[in-house]
Amino acid sequence: MREPTYTGPAKGLHWITALLVFGLLGIGLWMTGLPISLLKLQVYAWHKWIGLVVLVLTAARLLWRWRHPPPPLPDAVTRWERALAPAGHWALLLLLLAMPLSGWLMSSAAGISVVWFGVLPLPDMVPRDTGLFESLRTLHYVLSRLLILVLAVHVIAVLHHDVVRRDGILRRMWPTGGK
Ligand code: HEM
């Protein structure tokens, strides 16, 4: 009998988010070092727009997860993994909310309103405030390093399950895997 898997929408949201987040991390690390230029402004704008797409996708994911909980872990998974796996997943989900929210707050505190994809003006979350901007910038930076760390653990854990233990954990989330 085949193991149960995540639902189609959960898989779709997972892989689209993964692609966008890896892109955002790469762009984020690159763009801050660019000299002031039109390119820098455009890259910052796209970083913000796509970051906010991740916010919407993560909110949708949480709603979907509320009605469609993840499938139970296979019996082969140990007791400590059973406790740690959900903690890691919740840490990732919280970071995927905190990253875009801190970015949006930072942009507002800098006095730069976000016009989503150049068409939808979004409200400012806080009034312009240089001190607050600096704190939020530090927060966004620290959260990004935390996200990289938790993502690295997540990917290494999945690879360990797939390559060493071969217990089908990756198949549960793979687009074509499972039943
Ligand atoms: C999941 C979503 C996001 C991720 C993973 C992400 C990631 C990053 C990373 C890695 C950096 C570089 C930090 C550094 O090394 O200094 C960065 C910078 C930045 N992000 Fe994001 N970000 C996200 C969402 C957003 C959003 C939604 C906004 C604004 C609406 C935003 C605004 C900014 C700005 C303005 C900077 C540059 C800060 C500076 O100039 O020092 N980010 N982001």
Image (cartoon, rainbow, N blue to C red):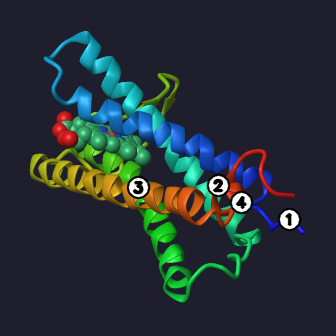
Percent position (x, y) of residue 68? 76, 68
Q: Residue furthest right?
A: 1
**Quadrant of the picture in which ligand 1 is shown:** top left
Q: Amino acid at mark 2?
A: Ala
Q: Choose mark 2 or mark 4, whichever is in front.
A: 4
Q: Which residue is mark 4?
A: 172
Q: Which residue is mark 1?
A: 2
| Nearest to N terminus: mark 2 or mark 1 | 1
Check residue 60 in the rendering and tell me which mark sits there, or answer none: 2
Q: Choose mark 3 or mark 1, whichever is in front.
A: 1
- Residue 110: tell me if it is visible: no
Circle 2: is it few (<14), some (14-19), or many (20+) Cα within 10 Å? some
Tell me the element at label 1: loop
Position of 103 with respect to 1 (left or right) is: left
All told, the count of numbered labels is 4
| Nearest to N terminus: mark 3 or mark 4 | 3
| Nearest to N terminus: mark 3 or mark 1 | 1
Q: Amino acid at mark 4?
A: Arg
Give the spatial CA distance, label 2 vs label 4. Answer: 20 Å
